[in-house]
């Protein structure tokens, strides 16, 4: 997909946008854009399932003894946690969401009002409205690219990403229902605009860290595009892609295997 | 992975790789084995810079990834062993013993390796695991204590030399004494593993190993365990170990039988003749029959097992094994579908 940029929206403009933002530089040095708190204990310790312990075969050189323990060796393996158990912990441990560093609320562009932090589960109307506005920009861009300057597009994607980065109750469902996912995935392929790739990957990472991982994983070309980003010249983009893939891999064994099968994954990693 | 440009990138990549290696069924070895060496290299690098706060996460995630990769058959274990993971992990076990988040997967990984063959187990011993075993058994973390006992139990299922290593080449019983202590009074999860370790030493070890275990009160610990009738596999392991002891007793007149009796072991085994699990009650009966079924006095002469026509009647030693009357229905020995006192040879 190609952008048609207006005269003012050349690369120089992109860098200016970068430096005003939280996002950090593009030279691979990570700054404040990474989450302050990491969820590290990703892996619950499973209780040993004694009665189903595997008894490993001893090599046939020595046979006769072990009655009562096993017909051969006394060695016992251990069963790891099942996928099912891991799934139940996934929101806490398996996935990490990127947040705006230190942010407890939103910082939007000056054209919108400041949103209050929401303590209940419903999304406030201003957010709903805002999402709708932002999606209009994206929709317009895809239907008639010439009419939307790239910087506006980038701003819109950034704002969506910010909405998805709030700590409590990000409007994930709303944004998915509004049709943003295929757009984000499409933006992953815009090699001429790494900032856009970065923002899209960030947004997808956060969605993939919630219960809606499947929506991301099942989106056509999502995994393929993310794996291609492993080869991006931009360190931030590569890192964000890796992160998103990690969230998807943690969702299920089949997604894990889907990623492992993707051509270019191993080398890219 | 080969040259992460930032610590943050290294952190993300190790975390994602760990997710790619995780889960059952395990991913194909041929696909993921290529991650092993880079993981070990990252671990080495993180080791060199322990002050960086991301290092801790990197070490932890890398250790988890290696623990997933080593979880499986000997081929997988070999792939991990070949990569120099064992000495690298041990180096960090030495350096950061109190860092629980790292230690848990590191010990788990070493434990997986020790479920492999003798050579693979040797790699863990050569890296000096046993030098730290005493401390690990005292670790704050229950999971680490448990896994350490598990590792020792698997070493104890190895070669005679490997078992001798548990006794520091017979220079010290301290480690085994500590295992016995765990077998006495640790929380059940840990206790089970320690019991396995002792049983394996007795069953797989030499006579000298056996004497050492007995000298540190191993018999009492095992006898106590028989009271807990939940875990059939464990009961069988203990009884196997007892059979070994009793065989040795017959050969060498060591009074193990007397010891077992004094420790309450015989009583417990008698009770196990009523255990719902077939294997358990059969074994318990066999033991009583073979080692404790001798007539004590004249009255009991005719109660001694008489083997005729491939059946034998089961006598009553001085203690009431088979309550007659009301409770007789509880005691059912259906080895061959026969009634209580007429049991076909198993």
Image: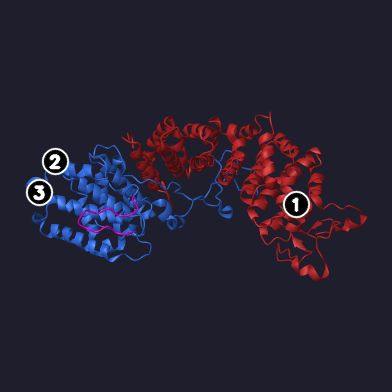
Q: Are marks 3 and 2 on the same chain?
A: yes
Q: Chain of mark 3?
A: A
Q: CA distance from mark 2 to mark 1?
A: 87 Å
| CB within 8 Å, label 2 to label 1 | no
Disc 1, SS: helix
Quick one: SS at disc 2? helix
Tell me, by letter, which chain the rendering colours red. Answer: B
Most prominent secondary structure in the magenta stretch? loop
Location of residue B313 (image quadrant): bottom right
Q: Please name whichever residue, B143 or B123, is drawn nearer the observer in this view of the structure.
A: B143
- In the image, A14: left or right of B179? left
> Where does the magenta region start and end?
A103-116
User: Looking at the picture, how far across and down is residue B124, in whole percent?
Assistant: 53, 34
Residue to which mark 3 is pinned: A5
Sequence-first tag of 3 and 2 = 3
The residue located at (27%, 46%) in the rendering is A227
Q: Colour of chain A?
A: blue
């Amino acid at each position: 997909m190609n952008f048609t940029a207006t005269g003012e929206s050349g690369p120089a403009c992109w860098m200016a946008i970068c430096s005003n933002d939280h996002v950090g530089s593009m030279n691979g040095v990570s700054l404040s854009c990474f989450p302050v708190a990491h969820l590290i204990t990703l892996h619950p310790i499973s209780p040993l399932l004694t009665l189903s312990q595997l008894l490993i075969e001893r090599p046939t050189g020595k046979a006769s003894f072990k009655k009562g323990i096993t017909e051969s060796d006394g060695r016992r393996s251990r069963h790891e946690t099942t996928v099912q158990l891991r799934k139940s912990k996934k929101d806490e441990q398996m996935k990490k969401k990127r947040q705006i560093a230190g942010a407890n609320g939103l910082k939007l562009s000056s054209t919108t009002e400041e949103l209050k932090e929401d303590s209940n589960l419903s999304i406030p109307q201003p957010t709903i409205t805002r999402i709708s506005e932002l999606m209009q920009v994206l929709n317009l861009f895809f239907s008639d690219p010439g009419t939307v300057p790239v910087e506006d597009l980038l701003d819109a994607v950034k704002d969506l990403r910010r909405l998805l980065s709030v700590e409590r109750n990000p409007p994930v469902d709303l944004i998915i229902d509004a049709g943003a996912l295929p757009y984000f995935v499409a933006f992953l392929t815009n090699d001429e605009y790494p900032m856009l790739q970065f923002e899209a990957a960030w947004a997808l990472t956060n969605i993939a860290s919630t219960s809606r991982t499947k929506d991301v994983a099942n989106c056509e070309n999502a995994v393929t595009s993310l794996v291609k980003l492993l080869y991006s010249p931009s360190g931030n983009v590569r890192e964000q892609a890796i992160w998103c893939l990690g969230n998807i891999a943690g969702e299920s064994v089949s997604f894990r295997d889907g990623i492992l099968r993707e051509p270019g994954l191993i080398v890219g990693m | 992975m080969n040259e992460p440009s930032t610590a943050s990138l290294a952190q993300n990549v190790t975390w994602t790789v760990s997710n790619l290696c995780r889960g059952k069924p395990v991913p194909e070895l041929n696909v993921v084995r290529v991650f092993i060496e880079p993981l070990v290299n990252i671990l080495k690098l993180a080791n060199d810079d322990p002050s960086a706060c991301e290092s801790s996460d990197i070490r932890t995630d890398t250790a988890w990834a290696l623990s997933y990769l080593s979880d499986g058959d000997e081929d997988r274990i070999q792939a991990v062993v070949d990569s120099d993971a064992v000495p690298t992990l041990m180096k960090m076990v030495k350096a950061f013993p109190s860092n629980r988040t790292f230690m848990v997967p590191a010990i788990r990984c070493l434990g997986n390796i020790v479920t492999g063959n003798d050579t693979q187990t040797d790699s863990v011993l050569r890296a000096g695991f046993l030098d730290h075993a005493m401390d690990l058994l005292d670790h704050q973390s229950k999971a680490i204590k448990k896994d350490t006992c598990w590792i020792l139990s698997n070493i104890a299922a190895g070669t005679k030399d490997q078992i001798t290593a548990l006794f520091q080449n017979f220079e010290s019983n301290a480690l085994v004494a500590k295992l016995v202590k765990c077998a006495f009074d640790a929380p059940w999860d840990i206790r089970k593993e320690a019991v396995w370790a002792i049983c394996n030493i007795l069953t797989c070890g030499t006579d000298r190993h056996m004497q050492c275990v007995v000298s540190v009160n191993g018999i009492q610990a095992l006898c106590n365990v028989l009271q807990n009738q939940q875990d059939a596999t464990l009961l069988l392991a203990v009884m196997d170990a007892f059979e070994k002891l009793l065989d040795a007793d017959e050969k060498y007149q060591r009074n193990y039988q007397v010891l077992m009796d004094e420790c309450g072991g015989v009583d417990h085994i008698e009770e196990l003749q009523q255990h719902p699990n077939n294997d358990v009650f059969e074994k318990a009966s066999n033991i009583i029959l073979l080692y404790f079924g001798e007539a004590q006095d004249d009255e009991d002469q005719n109660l001694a097992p008489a083997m005729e026509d491939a059946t034998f009647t089961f006598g009553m030693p001085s203690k009431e094994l088979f309550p007659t009357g009301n409770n007789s229905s509880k005691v059912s020995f259906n080895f061959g579908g026969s009634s209580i006192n007429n049991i076909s040879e198993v």
